[in-house]
Image: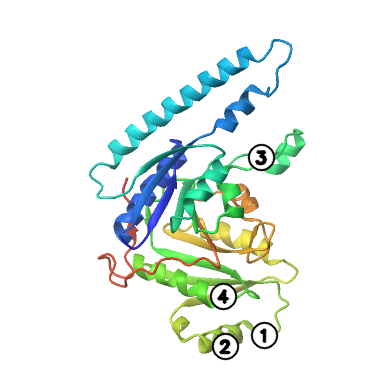
């Protein structure tokens, strides 16, 4: 095996889309897939809303808590049966795990043994709409992990039918050659095209053509990489990223890849935006959020059988 994928699995529509994508990538890249379902015990307590004895004592709450936990475990068993039945015949190795506890901590702990996280994401209301209704903004699991995970995170929102290109997006003042090289290695293993777009606020002193030329001169491995700079004076890179991503999301088979940086409090994108905000704002099929310091497994150049420009077909 060249590596392993962790698939946090809830049984939702989006997690099934993530399951199909994880299995297809595993078959192509000769990786294993471990599925993980977390029984949220803490969440069961939150549903009850009472942690100390009140006017009717603790007995009814203890009984309700035990009953709710039992039902959650029954759901985990049914999900396991369904997952294994769907997996039969796919030729993908890996285990099924049921963990209990706080989901983010449990997933992060298990992800340290894997190279890639693949999970579904359901787009919720925009924060502005929630604030207008005086509701607190609660982040989903994928949104929290996008800010905390040190492993690459592939977020899946809709059925992804094919991959034909990895579209890398970076701020022009944050060039990480190692990160770019790792992304190109993945594109090579998938045998798909790879492009690189730099976002600039119009304040970069070097002309775009000179910047691209100098970057390729300094990094011979980038000579054949398709590059461009998106500049709009007065617009910050984060605003440019939104506009550019919306254009990419309409291109079939294009998988955007975003670099994130650890700023000691939480992860941010290379263009200065919280990745969780980006997940809430943009509707997409799939998006790869890749920490720039992570060491992704090196895939063999001969992986797969597709021609270089033939899309990688994903089957359910």
**260 vs 224, nearest the viewer:** 260
Q: State the image coordinates of residue 197 (x, y, percent, origin top left).
A: 55, 71
Give the number of the disc on residue 138.
3
Residue holding disc 1: 206
**Label 4's element?**
loop
Above/below status of 219 relative to 133 = below
Q: Mark 4 or 1 closer to N-term?
A: 4
Q: Specify whether residue 191 is in view.
A: no
Residue holding disc 2: 214
Residue holding disc 4: 176
Mark 3 and mark 4: span between their CA atoms? 32 Å
Above/below status of 81 relative to 94 = above
Mark 2 and mark 3: span between their CA atoms? 44 Å
Foreground mark, 2 or 3? 3
**Label 2's element?**
helix
Q: Which class describes the residues within 10 Å of circle 4: few (<14), some (14-19), or many (20+)?
A: few
Q: Mark 2 or 3 closer to N-term?
A: 3
Q: State the image coordinates of residue 162 (x, y, percent, origin top left).
A: 37, 55
Q: Mark 2 or 4 closer to N-term?
A: 4
Foreground mark, 4 or 1? 4
Give the number of the disc on residue 219.
none
Q: State the image coordinates of residue 112 (x, y, percent, origin top left).
A: 48, 55
Q: State the image coordinates of residue 190 (x, y, percent, origin top left).
A: 35, 65
Above/below status of 12 relative to 277 = above
Q: Which class describes the residues within 10 Å of circle 3: few (<14), some (14-19), or many (20+)?
A: few
**28 vs 244, nearest the viewer:** 28
């Amino acid at each position: 095996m060249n590596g392993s994928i962790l698939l946090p699995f809830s049984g939702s529509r989006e997690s099934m889309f993530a399951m199909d994508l994880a299995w297809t990538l595993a078959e192509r890249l000769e990786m294993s897939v471990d599925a993980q379902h977390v029984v949220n015990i803490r969440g069961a307590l939150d549903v009850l809303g009472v942690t100390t004895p009140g006017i009717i004592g603790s007995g009814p709450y203890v009984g309700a808590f035990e009953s709710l936990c039992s039902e959650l475990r029954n759901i985990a068993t049914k999900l396991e049966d369904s997952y294994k039945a769907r997996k039969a015949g796919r030729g993908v190795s890996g285990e099924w795990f049921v963990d209990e506890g706080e989901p983010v901590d449990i997933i992060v702990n298990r992800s340290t043994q894997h190279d890639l996280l693949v999970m579904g994401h359901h787009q919720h209301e925009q924060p502005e709409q929630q604030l207008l209704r005086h509701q607190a903004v609660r982040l989903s699991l994928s949104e929290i992990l996008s800010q905390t995970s040190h492993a690459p995170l592939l977020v899946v929102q809709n059925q992804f039918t094919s991959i034909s290109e990895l579209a890398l997006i970076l701020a022009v003042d944050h060039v990480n050659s190692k990160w770019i090289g790792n992304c190109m290695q993945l594109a090579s293993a998938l045998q798909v095209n790879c492009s690189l777009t730099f976002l600039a606020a119009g304040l970069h002193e070097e002309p775009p053509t000179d910047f691209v030329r100098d970057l390729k001169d300094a990094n011979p491995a980038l000579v054949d990489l398709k590059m461009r700079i998106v500049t709009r004076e007065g617009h910050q890179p984060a605003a440019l990223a939104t506009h550019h991503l919306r254009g990419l999301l309409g291109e079939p088979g294009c998988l955007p890849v975003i670099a994130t940086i650890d700023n000691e409090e939480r992860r941010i994108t290379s263009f200065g935006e919280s990745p969780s905000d980006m997940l809430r704002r943009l509707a997409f099929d799939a998006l790869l959020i890749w920490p720039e310091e992570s060491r992704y497994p090196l895939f063999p150049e001969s992986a797969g059988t597709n021609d270089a420009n033939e899309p990688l077909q994903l089957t359910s």
